[in-house]
Amino acid sequence: MTGTSSRGARACQGRDAKSKEDFDLASAYVSDAQYNRNVFFDTSPQAIRLYLLYNRRLPRVLVYFFILLDLSLAVFEAPAVWPLPPWATMLAELVCLHVFALRLIHYAKVIPRDKFWKDPKNICMIAILALTLVDMIIYGALHAAGFYALRWSRVLRPLLLVNVTEGRQLRRAIRSIRNALPQILSVFLLFIFSILIFSLMALKLFSKRGLTTADGAPYFSNYADAVFELYVLVTTANSPDVMMPAYDASSAFAVFFIVYILVNTYIFMSVFLAVVFNNYKKYLKEEVRQLVRAKRHKMARAFAVLLERPEDGGEGEGRGVPLVSRASWNRLVRSVQPDIRRAHTELLWSVSDDDNRGAIDERSFVQLADLLNIEVITLKSRPHPLDRLCPALYRSAPSRLVCRSVRHRAFAVAYDVVILINAVFIGLDEEQPMIGNSEWAFLALYLLEILLKLYVIEPRTFFSAHSFWNWFDTIIVVCALIATVINAAFESSGRYTSRQILDIVFILRVLRLIRVVDSIKRFRTIMNTLIRIGPAILTFGQLILVVFYVFAMVGMELFAGKVKFYEDAGDPARADCGNALLRGSAFARLGYCKNNFNDVVAAFVLLMQLTVVNQWHILSSGFTAVTHKSARIYFVLFHVVVVIVIINIFVAFVLEAFFLEYSLDKSDLHTELEKKIEQLQLGVAQDAMEDNLVGAMETSDHEQPAEQLESSKHKLMFKIASKRYRTVDALLQRLFEADLEREDDGAGDTADVHNGNGNFANPSFGAA
């Protein structure tokens, strides 16, 4: 792996020495390509140093911390969960604004001034900061003077999450939805037209028949009520209630509602889902195409900075071809990923320099960003401490039999059965002596399991940072043992008779059933797939958080204090939620008083209930009753934005990503890396490291399987975690890989460096 040919050595003798500034610039390009950052940064040495600092983990973590702090201020602002004086929350928000402003100034220092002012997200950030500051001044002045004041800028807070540089995935999702809106709007207008037509027919059919609802209200008495009731029927929330008065009057009227449901609920909603996802996917695919192109250009830029031309006396086909030496490549990789292991670096180099020239050309160099995104698991061979202290005993036949037994599949199956039996016992009446005493037997079995594993597995490996199940089992068993002992001691002293501590431990031990599910291959595949698409789900989670926060702030201003919840069951005000307008309403009768907008937590809970859709019309009717019928607009708008658009896209995207992950084949890069591992005899058999949730979560050191530990000549072995993605962008690229047209790999771009171009134009979709 480490040797190079004399041809490669001669080729690199005449290279120009590269300065630290060159490596800083190349490192910035490669890091941008690896994490798909599309920043048109200045290439001066000072700007590069600032840009590398800008992308460090600590500043990015701090930005998200202060964004969360800014969003959480709603918990302490009126209407508050825990009220604080206005000056305290405004002071905290002022600190947050200063942090965001400093981050924005830092960003302005690393990109050309004209690019900064043309970037929409920068303009949005400046506008948000300025408007928030103006609102704080106005609110403070009005509050000090004793006048009513409104904190209208609170709806702008979640937009910080969208417009920070790190929010590129969220901006991409919003851009794709925005671009797809014209096509979505066409179908939505046709859908609304259908509801309006059916509402008009319902008005003519039922308004003059003297029918009433179960509450005694007039049935389809006006057009606005008819439109709203039939819109609710599309969501099935008021079915069959809305149909029953007409159906009771005549069975023939059921035909109207059946046809309506078929047309609008089943046909239109299905078409809407297809149109929403098809158009969203089309624009997202175009963004990913641009993203891949930008990544290749970034890598071509990095190559142009580090390239070295061999002497004209070079041999063979490599003569005169620009190359990057191994020394430069190694220094670059260590700069981009400082924590990378040397063995991992050499493995990646052997893939890039497949013909062993000692230097690589542009085509091989460009794949570095993708290589760094491939999860490579390092398996270390460590001797057990008992093997060092008493080798004769540890290597004896009985000891080896114990080790083989613990590593055998039957051992895991046996303990899975024990966990299942324990779960059955937990569900039984623990007051029975046999059931209560059985817990000691199960605890003994679990302790024996951990001790046996520690006897077989080297302790540092057993308790490594990413050994999820080992930590999980050990913590639960130790906590159960401590709690059981404490509970027994208290009971024997007669001072304590409750089993609450033990009940909590029982709940934790029930979680061990997850391990049983993980041991079943079919279930494990599904669970691993859900874990792997987690980053993509998180992006939509951020989008929903933004929308929820905006609607929560608006809802709190519109409906705060209109509905109240009284904990005292004997309080007469509890019957009508503290508002006489709700007396006798379905909202009050069903006990929905706690579903209100009196603080941000209650608002989020209510919005989640509206997202589920069931009974959302009853929830909306309560706030309509205490305000005005026009309040329905708020709830219908929330349903359209969240349920019809965002949730449909989310469901369709998760399905697409799930199918991709569930049937994932290895990419060409993965194949080349695995071929190299096999060629160098540094591979570990896949069946020896069978995928499970541990494999899905771990990314660093693993214990090398015992069978291979004994036979291997190497201290380190490698395994490709071929189904892992470091970034959401990598998943998106894989998601649309079959549809993406083959782009140029950046060849020819290196000439721009000699023309004075230190960067390249942003792709057409705009700044990320």
Image: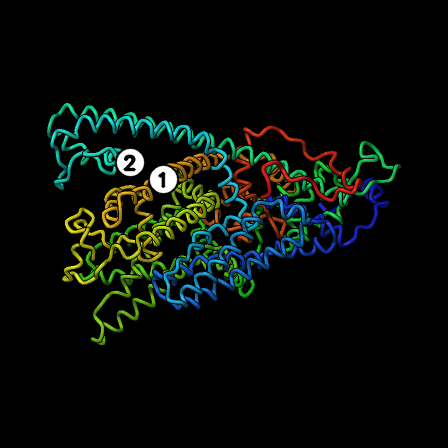
Residue 756's x, y, as percent? Answer: 78, 43
**Residue 149 sits in quarter:** bottom left
2 and 1 marks in contact (CB < 8 Å)? yes
> Is 30 displayed left or right of 200 in the figure?
right
Q: In this view, does 288 lie above or below 328?
A: above
Residue 648's x, y, as percent? Answer: 39, 36
Write down the residue under mark 2. Answer: 235
Which amino acid is tagged 2? Thr
Which amino acid is tagged 1? Val
Name the one closer to the observer, 318 or 760. Answer: 760
Q: Residue 512 carries which label?
A: none
**Residue drawn at x 76%, y 54% as measured from the top left:** 20
Q: Considering only order in the chain, which callout, 1 or 2, is on the residue closer to the N terminus?
A: 2
Q: Which mark is residue 643?
A: 1
Q: Distance between the residues labelled 2 and 1?
A: 10 Å
> Is 391 displayed left or right of 144 in the figure?
right
Q: Residues within 10 Å of mark 1 (few under 14, many from 20)?
A: some
Residue 229's x, y, as percent? Answer: 24, 35
Q: In which quarter of the image is the C terminus?
A: top right
Name the one closer to the observer, 661 or 169. Answer: 169
Q: Residues within 10 Å of mark 2 (few under 14, many from 20)?
A: many
